[in-house]
Image (spheres, coloured by chain):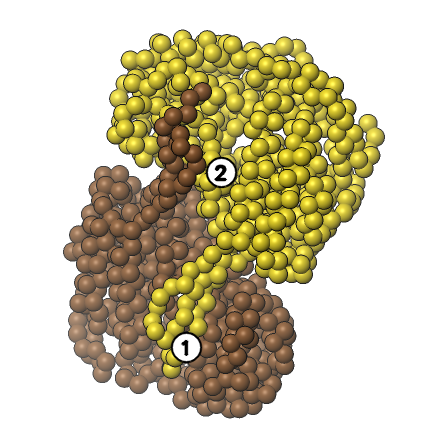
Chain colours: A brown, B yellow
């Protein structure tokens, strides 16, 4: 089976990583049935790093068969929760033992700074696996009182086969957020990583084996969304899809589910999250959090605080400080020690974002800083700030998914809330103020699944995460995620009713 | 038949005498109004095929008006502006009004659906007021969690109302399925656009007068009877409706999910069809098993999503069970829903009648043995004889597909593993029952059948505290119990930074 080996020799990381490039089905790497491949491109310079297998419907079918067999014979409730938990813990330990290597692969594949990949992505992945390892033996139903002649209770059974379709912005982390609860609850999993960023998912496969997961419990089929992803969404034996990605693709998955076996779906989609900054804030902190909100991960975050509403009284001071801070962010090689922002993930994304920047200019917003490509190699874009933005501009309404902030002045709290809610999205929001009443009021009034007060993009594994409105269906993380990976059965036992 | 904005039906029957008046128009924003396109439908009594009344049916435009009214009400005078205790009080009041008018509503339901007055009065109506009271009790107990993270942060969840909830309910239990969705949705603070079945709107129409009398603010509950492919589809496609709760056929459930995907990705919960197995082991109390199994398939004329339509009997008691089951089925009284002693009324409509007769025909053609019934009962109305098939094999249509009529398919089995496999050999997964005295076997079988409800030693004996919902293609989401509440809330996580400096 083919593999590729990459030599890292950088200021941040030196080492070798070997990754098998086949499909991981039933505990082994195999060739795809139609023998297709996908080129994996380094976004720093547009050059091909390697090719990996491109799975199609036939491979999804094989994976589903392996997963179903494993689920029936060597997984599900046959394996007590405590053992499932130990395997997840072991997987977390193995990931931790190889943390630097995984961070390097993620930085190479996605273009994010090594330091961020190590301290953000890989740490969060390890933590998520450990968190759900702890839930595995605590999947609880209820006993429910009805009357003395009946014993009634609920069981939270595994759903069965879970298809996990993972995006390219946080490949390892998003995968871990799905694997954790799915496996803790006793499901078998078929993973379809993004065709843009399959490396860490593939590198994880030998760790599944070493952690002791039986063959077929976790399968990884890299492939394109329109083939492998679609096949997974349509498969008659897959019981549930958990998807993180674009709203456009989310619709296709829901439609595919409706037309096949009505499989359950959880969708984590896009956002256009507002940060609302009142004039009593700690200015330095507000600037840093707002910057972290939009520029983190090069703006490639579903919760990006891409609309920044600043109250009139503090607007000029905020804009000045925010601009200075944005100009200080270092854009460059992900493996340089002081890099903050690497390239966007692909040529397509680069062009998309540049297109939005162009529309911002054309629709009359002011480019305060940035707005151009950075350098002349790879997909780098300067941190960009638009001011004089109006509600109907594309850069205010549509998800850009790049390092582009739209700053909007507001006067009153009511106006800010109304503008904040004037969107089809509802993923997250943040409010910055010292006034306790206002903080809670605004957090409660904005229609979003996560409200941050005096912070942004400060995530917690133990709190649920998901969208209102067109930002999604269902919740990930926390205990709440578990209900999306279980089938609730009510059992009524007659201990005395006679007809 | 002329159109009047209210109609009075005179009942003069052995079990109920009285005049019941009901509105006939759409109920939008607290008013009874004509539909934009002035559509109407003539309702038919399935026992006699005679006309009952002409009522309004709404279209896409009316659904939009209702959704706008619901949205305005949610923003201005419902949602979290009204504390849970106040929502609770209104739900309790509505329950009291339902009880005070139980006989009238039961008569309307029996007239419209063809179920017996006795069943409507003894089951549908008490379930309705009980569900209202049950969720009235939850209304001030909608709780999130405070979740530990680090000392520098406060994290908690809020379980907020979603907003405008679309409710689409079927014709087999018009009132109780409507209330099973209205009650938790209202308890959680949502507003409603309900579309009852165009065939069976009478109890919903009567309910509108009670909703007004109970004091629900205008626009909180809107009821628009209409056809599935116009009004129902409009609910699925509306950009204003945040969630749709649907009970009905699997076929229509798919359309709703697709409409949601293509419009505003509204949340959906679906309660769909079933082909629920009853499994009777040879140590079962046979007399009791027979009684429960009879009820399981013939209750409500077999027009029941959880109907125990596949009956597996272990070889050792097969002959005994079959004889007793057949005798019992033969004794079921079929006839006028308003006659004392009637067990089974007519099927709901000519179309359903034809459908069920079609399945009976296919059973015979595919080689099953018609042990009992199989014919129309009488010469007027849509009555079908309680029907029993034996010698059924797994691939027969009558074993695979949901018939939704008084037709039982009985099969013999020998071993537990075999019957579990057969029981699970279906795309459905709504309910199942197992009859045995052996505690291990009872628990094992209940655990291993892929269904959202498992009954041990009875069938179709629900409890409001327990959730109801399907595995596989029987649906997504839950009705009843505390678990229903999550269908009607949006979870918001709030993170408060009380010390993290970046």
- Up/down of B401 relative to A372, above or below: above
The residue at 26%/57% (across/down) is A134
Residue B491 versus residue B130 in the image, above or below: below
Q: Quadrant of the N terminus of chain A?
A: bottom left
B214 with respect to A147 (left or right)? right
x 69%, y 21%: residue: B16
**Residue visible at 58% across and 36% down?**
B128
Report x, y in % for residue A358.
Answer: 55, 77
Q: Is residue B502 above or below residue B62?
A: below
Mark 1 — residue? B498
Residue A57 left/right relative to A102: right
The residue that mark 2 highlights is: B464
Horizontal side of A331 relative to A119 (left or right) equals: right
Q: Earlier in the sequence, mark 1 or mark 2?
A: 2
**Mark 1: secondary structure:** loop
Question: Image quadrant of residue B255?
Answer: top right
Q: Nearer the viewer, residue B306 or B130?
A: B130
């Amino acid at each position: 089976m083919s593999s590729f080996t990459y030599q890292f020799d950088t200021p941040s990381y030196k080492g070798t990583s070997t990754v098998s490039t086949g499909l991981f089905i039933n505990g082994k790497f195999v060739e795809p049935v139609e023998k297709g491949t996908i080129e994996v491109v380094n976004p720093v310079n547009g050059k091909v790093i390697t090719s990996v297998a491109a799975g199609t419907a036939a491979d999804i079918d094989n994976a589903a068969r392996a997963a179903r067999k494993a689920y029936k014979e060597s997984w599900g409730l046959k394996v007590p929760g405590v053992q499932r938990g130990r395997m997840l813990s072991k997987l977390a330990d193995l990931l931790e033992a190889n943390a630097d290597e995984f961070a390097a692969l993620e930085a190479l594949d996605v273009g994010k700074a090594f330091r961020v990949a190590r301290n953000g992505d890989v740490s969060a992945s390890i933590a998520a696996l450990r968190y759900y390892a702890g839930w595995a033996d605590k999947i609880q139903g209820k006993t429910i009182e009805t009357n003395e002649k009946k014993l009634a209770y609920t069981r939270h059974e595994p759903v069965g086969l879970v298809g996990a379709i993972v995006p390219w912005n946080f490949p390892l982390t998003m995968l871990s957020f799905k694997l954790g609860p799915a496996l803790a609850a006793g499901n078998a999993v078929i993973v379809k990583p993004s065709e843009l960023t399959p490396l860490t998912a593939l590198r994880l496969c030998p760790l599944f084996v070493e952690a002791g997961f039986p063959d077929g419990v976790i399968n990884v089929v890299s492939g394109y969304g329109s083939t492998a992803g679609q096949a997974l969404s349509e498969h008659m034996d897959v019981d549930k899809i958990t998807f993180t990605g674009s709203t456009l693709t989310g619709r296709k998955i829901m439609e595919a589910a409706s037309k096949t076996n009505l499989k359950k779906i959880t969708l984590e989609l896009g956002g256009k999250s507002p940060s609302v900054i009142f004039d009593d804030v700690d200015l330095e902190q507000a600037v840093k959090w707002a910057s972290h909100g939009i520029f983190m991960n090069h703006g490639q975050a579903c919760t990006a605080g891409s609309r920044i509403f600043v109250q009139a009284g503090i607007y000029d001071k905020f804009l000045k400080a925010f601009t200075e801070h944005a100009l200080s962010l270092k854009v460059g090689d992900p493996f340089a020690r002081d890099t903050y922002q690497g390239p966007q993930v692909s040529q397509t994304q680069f062009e998309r974002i540049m297109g939005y920047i162009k529309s911002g200019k054309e629709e009359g917003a002011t480019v305060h800083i940035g707005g151009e490509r950075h350098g002349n190699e790879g997909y780098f874009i300067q941190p960009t700030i638009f001011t004089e933005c109006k509600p109907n501009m594309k850069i205010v309404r549509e998800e850009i998914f790049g390092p582009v902030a739209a700053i909007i002045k507001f006067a009153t709290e009511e106006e800010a809330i109304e503008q904040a809610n004037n969107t089809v999205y509802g993923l997250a929001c943040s409010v910055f103020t010292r006034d306790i009443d206002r903080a809670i009021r605004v957090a409660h009034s904005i229609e979003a699944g996560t409200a941050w007060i005096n912070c942004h993009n400060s995530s917690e594994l133990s709190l649920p995460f998901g969208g209102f409105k067109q930002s999604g269906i269902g919740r990930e993380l926390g205990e709440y995620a578990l209900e999306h990976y279980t089938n609730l059965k009510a059992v009524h036992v007659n201990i005395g009713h006679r007809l | 038949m002329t159109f009047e904005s209210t109609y009075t039906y005179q009942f003069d029957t052995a079990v109920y005498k009285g005049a019941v008046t009901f509105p006939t128009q759409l109920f939008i924003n607290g008013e009874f109004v004509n539909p934009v396109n002035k559509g109407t439908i003539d309702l038919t009594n399935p026992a006699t095929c005679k006309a009952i009344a002409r009522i309004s049916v709404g279209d896409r435009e009316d659904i939009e008006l209702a959704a706008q009214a619901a949205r305005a009400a949610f923003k201005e005078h419902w949602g979290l502006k009204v504390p849970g205790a106040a929502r609770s009080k209104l739900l309790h009041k509505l329950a009291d009004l339902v009880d005070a008018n139980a006989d009238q509503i039961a008569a309307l339901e029996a007239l419209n659906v063809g179920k017996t007055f006795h069943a409507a009065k003894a089951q549908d109506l008490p379930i309705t007021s009980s569900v209202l009271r049950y969720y009235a009790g939850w209304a001030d107990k909608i709780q999130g969690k405070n979740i530990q993270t680090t000392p520098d942060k406060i994290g908690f969840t809020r379980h907020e109302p979603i907003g405008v909830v679309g409710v689409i309910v079927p014709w087999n239990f018009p009132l109780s399925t409507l209330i099973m969705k209205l009650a938790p949705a209202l308890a959680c603070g949502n507003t409603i656009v309900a579309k009852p079945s165009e065939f069976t709107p009478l109890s919903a129409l009567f309910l509108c007068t009670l909703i007004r009398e109970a004091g629900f603010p205008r626009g909180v509950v809107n009821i628009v009877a209409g056809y599935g492919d116009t009004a129902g589809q409009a609910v699925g496609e509306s950009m204003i409706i945040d969630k749709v709760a649907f009970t009905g056929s699997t076929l229509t459930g798919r359309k709703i999910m697709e409409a949601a995907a293509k419009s505003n990705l509204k949340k959906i919960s679906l309660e769909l069809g079933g082909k629920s197995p009853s499994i009777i082991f040879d140590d079962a109390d046979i007399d009791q098993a027979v009684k429960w199994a009879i009820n399981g398939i013939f209750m409500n004329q077999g027009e029941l999503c959880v109907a125990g339509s596949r009956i597996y009997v272990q070889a050792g008691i097969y002959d005994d069970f079959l004889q007793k089951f057949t005798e019992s089925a033969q004794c079921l009284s079929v006839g006028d829903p308003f006659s004392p002693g009637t067990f089974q009324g007519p099927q709901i409509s000519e179309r359903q009648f034809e459908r069920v007769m079609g399945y009976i025909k296919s059973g015979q053609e595919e080689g099953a043995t018609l042990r009992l019934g199989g014919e129309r009962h009488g010469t007027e109305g849509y009555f079908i004889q309680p029907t029993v098939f034996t010698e059924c094999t797994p691939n027969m249509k009558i074993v695979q597909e949901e018939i939704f009529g008084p037709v039982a398919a009985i099969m013999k089995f020998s071993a537990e593993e075999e019957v579990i496999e057969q029981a699970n050999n279906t795309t459905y997964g709504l309910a199942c029952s197992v009859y045995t005295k052996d505690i291990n076997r009872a628990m094992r079988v209940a655990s291993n059948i892929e269904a959202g409800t498992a009954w041990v030693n009875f069938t179709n004996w629900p409890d409001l505290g327990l959730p109801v919902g399907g595995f596989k293609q029987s649906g997504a989401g839950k009705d009843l119990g505390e678990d229903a509440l999550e269908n009607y809330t949006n979870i918001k996580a709030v993170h408060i930074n009380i010390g993290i400096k970046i």
